[in-house]
Image (tube, rainbow, N blue to C red):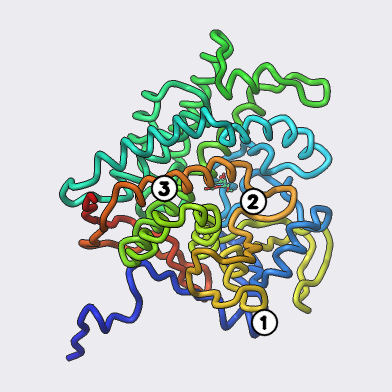
Amino acid sequence: MEHVTKDQKKTKTSEFPDPFEQARIQKGYSDIEDQNDPVTMLLRLKDVRKTAHNWKTFISGAKPGRIVVPSEVAIRDIRQIPFEVDPPEHTDYRNLVEPWFKRPLEEEYQAKLKDIIDELVDEVVNKEDVEVVADFSLKLQSRALTLLLNIPYEESETWISWGVHVFRSEDTALDGDKANILYDYLDEQIDKAIENPGNDLYSMLLSSEVNGQKMSKEEVKGVMILTFAGGRDTVINAVTNSISYFAENPKALKRIHEEPEIITKAVEELVRYFSPLTHMGRVVTEDTKVCEHAIKNDSRVSMCWASANRDSAVFEKPNEVVLDRKINPHVGFGFSHHNCLGATHARQILKVLLGSLAEKVGGIEIKNYKENIEEWGEFNRKVGFDNITVNFSGK
Ligand code: EMZ
């Protein structure tokens, strides 16, 4: 019988292997099945960038839900904005929401975010057996989201009660009933903001015009669904995975404490390494070719950020976390005009989190965990954890 001791274990808990390497080098793409609407995954950084850039041949404004993999066509018909819109309309929407989503750069916002994160870290330090996903990352993501929406902190209790996924439950990739909870909630909040406008994101959108037209309720809902869904499991995975990394690399946390000036680089590197969103799709508008591979009009491709971020043609030591990596043109937040709208908020969350952990936490011990493995055709990709229980010790 094979006996595996802890030291002999092949991969560490915080290690995220790259399942795409061979296919990326040999072919550059892989065809996968998805609800009878197949997808060609593009695996090389160069192709991923070119595809993201070429919005005329690779569109986002297809049937709502079709550019997401797995497709959400079966569970929603509302267009997410600006995510599922192409230029030139995309530019108008993006210009409208961009300043709001840049608010995390303001000092006051950052101070509030630091209070939220410090409080949560204080809560878990020296507490026995903390399940990080539910008791730390989900709370952090939900509480921080109240700042992005500029609404009262207490509202986060409702979102925490929904659990990690908005469109998914533990066993189903797509869960229509669960999505309806979010849609009904948003209808209610939009109606409330119409009756009682305030300084929140709903009210800002409702009072805005795009191209001389007042934003409709449907459009506002489209922006809000994106705000809720797009930054949920991605942020939760980034936070959880970072904690697993610092548990197994205590020197890294010590280094961040001693050299806080590397935090910005460390955040980019963790996003590159973990790539919280595996890929994002586009729909093709003409017969074309990628990697010498014919792609038919009206079929789907995806830009695999996770694979591109390990491309050895671009990154030295791609499978290592190099905390102060100097040149890091990763695509963890996507690329080109559709790059992640929530990236400023997400980066700020990770920066504050790293600072707070470095200041308050002496060590993290992993007790047990269950990995979250996604299956994409020939690939199995670890994207995070369904749960991971740790003990945080104080300083
Ligand atoms: C969509 C997507 C956006 C999608 C940047 O990603 O995130 C997914 O989690 C959602 O399911 O609807 O918002």
Give the distance between the C-alpha atoms of the residues marked 2 and 3, in whole angstroms. 39 Å
- Above or below, comparing residue 284 to residue 21 in the picture: above
Badge 1 amino acid: Lys
If the image is split into quadrants, where does the N terminus sit?
A: bottom left
In-front residue for pair 94/116? 116
Q: Is residue 99 left or right of residue 262?
A: right
Q: What residue is shown at x 77% (from left), y 26% (from top)?
A: 210
Q: What residue is shown at x 49% (from left), y 60% (from top)?
A: 270
Q: Secondary structure at mark 3?
A: helix
- Sequence-first tag of 2 and 1: 1
Give the distance between the C-alpha atoms of the residues marked 1 and 3, in whole angstroms. 41 Å
Badge 3 amino acid: Gly
Q: Quadrant of residue 328?
A: bottom right
In-front residue for pair 27/122? 122
In-front residue for pair 276/289? 276
On whether ligand 1 comes within 8 Å of the CB at mark 2, the answer is: no
Q: Where does label 3 land, which residue?
A: 355
Badge 2 amino acid: Arg
Q: Where does label 1 land, which residue?
A: 27
Residue 74: x and y in percent read 55, 47
Residue 150: x and y in percent read 51, 24
The residue at the far top in this view is 195
Q: What residue is shown at x 46% (from left), y 68% (from top)?
A: 381
Q: Secondary structure at mark 2?
A: loop
Tell me whether circle 2 and circle 3 mark residues in contact (CB < 8 Å).
no
Q: Which mark is residue 66?
A: 2
Q: Secondary structure at mark 1?
A: loop
Residue 243: x and y in percent read 35, 56
- Sequence-first tag of 1 and 3: 1
- Above or below, comparing residue 358 to residue 206 in the picture: below
